[in-house]
Amino acid sequence: MEFKEKNFFKKGKIKDNQIEDMKIVTKNMSLKKISESEIFFVPLLQHKGERAFEIVRVGQEVRKYEKIAQGYGSISANIHSPVSGKVIRIMKNFLPDGSKVRTIIIENNFKEERVKLVKRNMRELQMAESEEILKIIEEAGIVGLGGAGFPTASKYDIKLEKIDTFIINGMESEPYLTADYLLMKNYAKEICRGIKVAEKVLRPRHMVIAISEKNKELVSVFERMAREVNIDLQIKILSADYPQGSEILLIDKITGKKIQKGKLTIEKGVIVSNVGTIKAIYDAFFNGKPLIERIVTISGEEVPNAGNYKIRIGTPLVHIVDSLNITKTDKIIFGGPMMGNKVKEPSTPIIKGISGVIFLNEEKIESKNCISCGKCVEVCPMNLIPFEFSKYYEKGRYVKMLNANIFNCIECGACEYVCPSRVPLIESIKNGKEILVELINLEVES
């Protein structure tokens, strides 16, 4: 995969015809702490599916770990209070993608009053039934922490389906991000125990953890911990090329099975979970902890206190900026710089699926017309022709976009990154998909 045309986000460089991953900025640092925010913005939609509904009221005192919103419907997730304090308002507030959702605003009293947690041991895991474990995962509000945010209890409720391969994704291929690496480095034993919990539910024939070739030092760690925990875990070393961590590409590399974008992987007998999700499962089963915090990479250009921080869900952007004395806030990305969301609102909070906050210098880029050079085609991991989508979108030829398999696009951003004309390819693709979904729904309704 070649990436030759541009410097990586202005100051980065191209190394060996690949995107320089910029992970060196934070990779070798130990886990850091950030001060507690005075105010927490806890959205009721941090996952795929239906939003949760609040079960607290304005003025109510809440404790750390207390459930404050109940998941609704078959695909949803519970929400818990990250701190003890008072609910001071319930209103719509911003999510990282720019949309607004009902949000519980909590004033922190800094007392760390908490609900009593139910702890369990390995013997209790041996005795536990699948339904009991699923209920624990559901109650803890666990969702996919790799960014997709699909409720884990719903994903693991396989009923009579047979799982051939359970893949634990430790690739973290987006530039700058090292949160998963630090998690694997510091919590390998906990992750292996979390895998054992998931194994009890999924009963897979094979279990594989995928690790980047740049993190080979983790192999011996996981080999030792897998033996200690007594799980049959294969370790697959994959190239660090972006976007190798994509679920579809990962499944192809490990199993050889082709998954169409939008299709459920369970149809091919495969389930994929991020290492962060597995650690959250460990916390829920063995320590009784619901999902209220995660490790987040704070990095970018000219960030004075870059590193990986354990941050509670609901912590607003403004608190991170102020606490870490960050002054360069031209361009702020929640998530990875390739597939993340540009954030402007100071009250936008860390949610369950956010593994990075990246600060970049804003570039003023003049977009030009496509010159049909084909560079976007060369780098597309899904073997699509991205420049066609842009042309079809501009002309309103949406059926053409459909016939060109637009829904197979994983929106990794590689095409736009290499485009010498800076054509807004991803914008055309995302907007084209939205229009097509509306047209398809209208056709079904008629």
Image (spheres, rainbow, N blue to C red):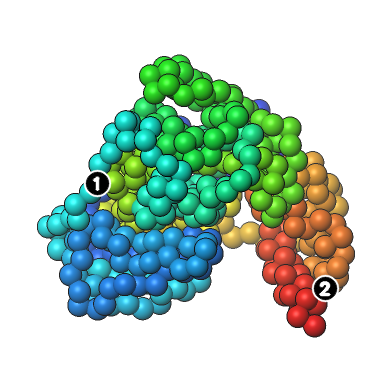
Q: Residue at x 49, y 35 (%)?
A: 199
Give residue 125's position: percent from left, percent from top: 36, 35
Is 21 left, or right, of 125 in this rendering? right
Give residue 309's position: percent from left, percent from top: 33, 44
Q: Residues within 10 Å of mark 1 (few under 14, many from 20)?
A: few
Is 239 left, or right, of 133 in this rendering? right
Q: Nearer the viewer, residue 431 or 438?
A: 438
Is 130 left, or right, of 174 in this rendering? left
Q: Splitting the image into 4 quarters, where does residue 179 fall? A: top left
Element on which disc 1 rests: loop
| Quarter placement of the N terminus | top right
Q: Residue at x 39, y 61 (%)?
A: 78
Is label 1 or label 2 in front? 1
| Quarter placement of the C terminus | bottom right
Q: Residue at x 74, y 37 (%)?
A: 257
Q: Splitting the image into 4 quarters, where does residue 164 fall? A: top right
Q: Nearer the viewer, residue 280 or 118?
A: 118
Asked if residue 11 is positioned above or below residue 343 in the image, the reply reads above
Is 362 left, or right, of 119 in this rendering? right
Q: Earlier in the sequence, mark 1 or mark 2?
A: 1
Give residue 73's position: percent from left, percent from top: 50, 67
Q: What separation in Å lies between label 1 and label 2 (alpha carbons)? A: 56 Å
Amino acid type at circle 1 is Val
Q: Residues within 10 Å of mark 2 (few under 14, many from 20)?
A: few
Residue holding disc 1:
118
Residue holding disc 2:
396
